[in-house]
Every structure is written in structure tokens, then in C-alpha cells.
Amino acid sequence: MALCNTVVPIKSNDGTVSYKAQSQDEEALVNAAAKLNMMLISKDTITAEICFNGSKFWYELLDILEFTSDRKRMSVVVKEGETGKILLLSKGADEALLPRACPGQQIQRYLEAVEMYSQLGLRTLCLGWRDLKENEYKEWSKNFQKASCSLDNREFKIAEVCNSLEQDLQILGVTAIEDRLQDGVPETIKLLRNAGINVWMLTGDKQNTAIQIGLLCNLITSGPNSQLLSISGKTEEDVLRSLERALFIMKNTSETKGLAFVLDGWALELILKHSKESFTRLAMLSKTAICCRMTPLQKAQVYLLLFIIVFNLPFLQSSSFLRD
């Protein structure tokens, strides 16, 4: 938690350390590590220094395997200053990290923890690590540099090289972070819905987390006249069948205010490819929807679809409209 991040520690004149972070999750994790006596006290592009129970340890920062919405994880490669030991430290979504665990670990236990935390509306991350042999790291580093300098399919090649290193991880555990709603959000959304304004949630969170947040902010309700339709499935056929079922219910319900649907990024990808017209009809009928596990591109695709529906525009196949 203290090393696998992009956080910058800032030391004040009185010696206290605060943290500057682009991600609130990373800041929360670094602060949590500090409360556990593992404090990040200094960091630059080359080294990082940790204070653990009053003793200082420094690490050479060798490489950063950056987070992307496709990878859903980030890693750092560090070398211990005293021992010269090379470590890979990783954190990411459960579906991105747990399949990379080495055999013999209690993966089901971690999955249960993720499920429990997400049902409480908390954002979850899994943490893992492994030792790297020097020869293994040197060989990998050459490939990483080669991929980073590539002019063709650079991002794909970098992802492939990163993937080759992020294997056989020892899972350390699961973290859960509360993403508190801003003041006035539930009241504002309730006013919007009462005024007849349709509200959709587009988020990268897990489905259970997104649903709990939807309940907290009055986006969806849990009353007797409410129903959350799930568009999901293990196969393409299951997903498309659940879409048609949701559309049928929407069409045949006189009062749709209490109806909402939820789907994830995988389901959306299949639907936009094979059943865009049905999804468009569902979107026109729906007053509320939760789209979870969305990549930034998928959020843009949903926004574009709703934009076209609202303004009654013809569907455009050109990607330039999406960029605009």
C-alpha cells in the first residue's frame, strides 16, 4: 500500500508528512499504511523511503506498470536498498489480480471478502506481490523497454509484456474504501427524478457496489413497487435473452418509475454488437439505469447513444462524432 502507487509525499517544515495524490483511493491506502506504522516519507522518480516502526528503509523504483481501464491493475518493480532483493508489488480489481495468483492460496476466501465489502457499497482492491530473480527481471526489462519504444501497437505490446510479469502472485489481502457521497446528492437526485428527469449511473465500480450507491443516493429504491432488472449472463445468448426480458417488462408495465436496469461492461459490449436496436428501445423506456464496470470508452458509447436518442439524431457510424 505504501509503495505501489503514484502518491507524492510532501514534508512540511515541522517534519509532518502529507500526501498529494491524483486518486483518492491511493491516498486512502497510503494513509492506511501509515496508520499501520508503514509510512511513506519521501519519494522521487528513482527512490522511495519508508519508515517502519521508527526504522527507515529505502527502495529503488525500477519500473511502473501503469494502471489502465483494460488492465484494471497497476504494479511497481522495486529493489530493496539493503538486500538488493527485487520485488513486484501489484494492486487491482479482483478479476484482474486473483486469476494471477500462484496455486495453493485461499482464493475463495478473498472472493467472499470482495463480495461482502461490495454489498456494503465499498470500493475493493486486491493486493499481491512476488520475488523476482535478477536474471528474470533483466530479461523482462529489455522486453519492456523494447515495447515502450515501439511505434506499432505500442499500448498492446506494453500490456502483453506487463502481463507476462504479473503472474504467480502471492495475494496479500483485500482492501475496502468508502467513497462517500457529496452533500446534497441524494436530495438532488430525488428532485430530478420527481421532476421527470431520467438519471443514469455510469461507473467503473463492481455491480454490488454500484447498486448500494444507487440506493444511498436515491437513484433506485427498494420499495414494493420497485424492481431492478439485471441484464447479464455467462454466455452471449444469456445476455441477449435477459435484454429481451427487460425490454418486455418495460413495455408491459404501466408505471415505469420504480423500474430500473443494471448491466456491466461485458454485457454492454455484446449488446452494442448484436442487439443495439433492442437496447435503444430499452433506453427510451427507462427512467433509471446503472451501467457498472464501464471503461471510459464504454461510458462515452452510452453517452453518445443517449445523446442520439434525446435529440432524435440518426445513428452515425463514424468514430469522429464520438471524439467530438
Image (spheres, helix red, strand yellow):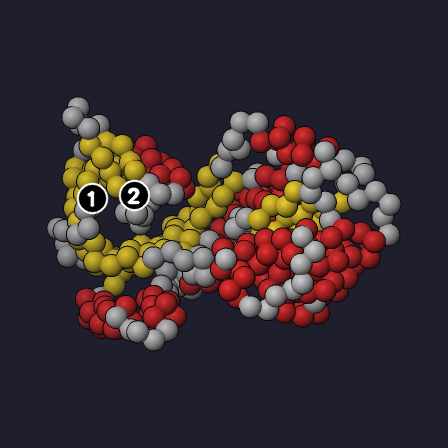
Q: Secondary structure at mark 1?
A: strand
Image point 38% across, 56% down: which residue? Answer: 67
Q: Which mark is residue 43?
A: 1
Residue displayed at 41% across by 42% down: 25
Front-lying residue, 123 or 13: 13
| Residue at the outermost top position | 14
Q: Nearer the viewer, residue 71 or 253?
A: 253
Residue at point 24%, 59% (across, down): 63
Q: Is residue 239 left or right of residue 137?
A: right
Q: Earlier in the sequence, mark 1 or mark 2?
A: 2
10 Å crowding of disc 2: few (<14), some (14-19), many (20+): many
Quarter holding residue 300: bottom right
Name the quarter where the N terminus is drawn.
top left
Using the image, tell me which numbered label, if any, was put on residue 7: 2
SS for tag 2? loop
Marks 1 and 2: CB-CB under 8 Å?
yes
Vertical side of 319 occupied by 3: above or below? above
Which residue is depicted at the point 22% across and 35% down? 10
Amino acid type indicated by mark 1: Lys
Judge left or right: residue 43 versus residue 233. Answer: left
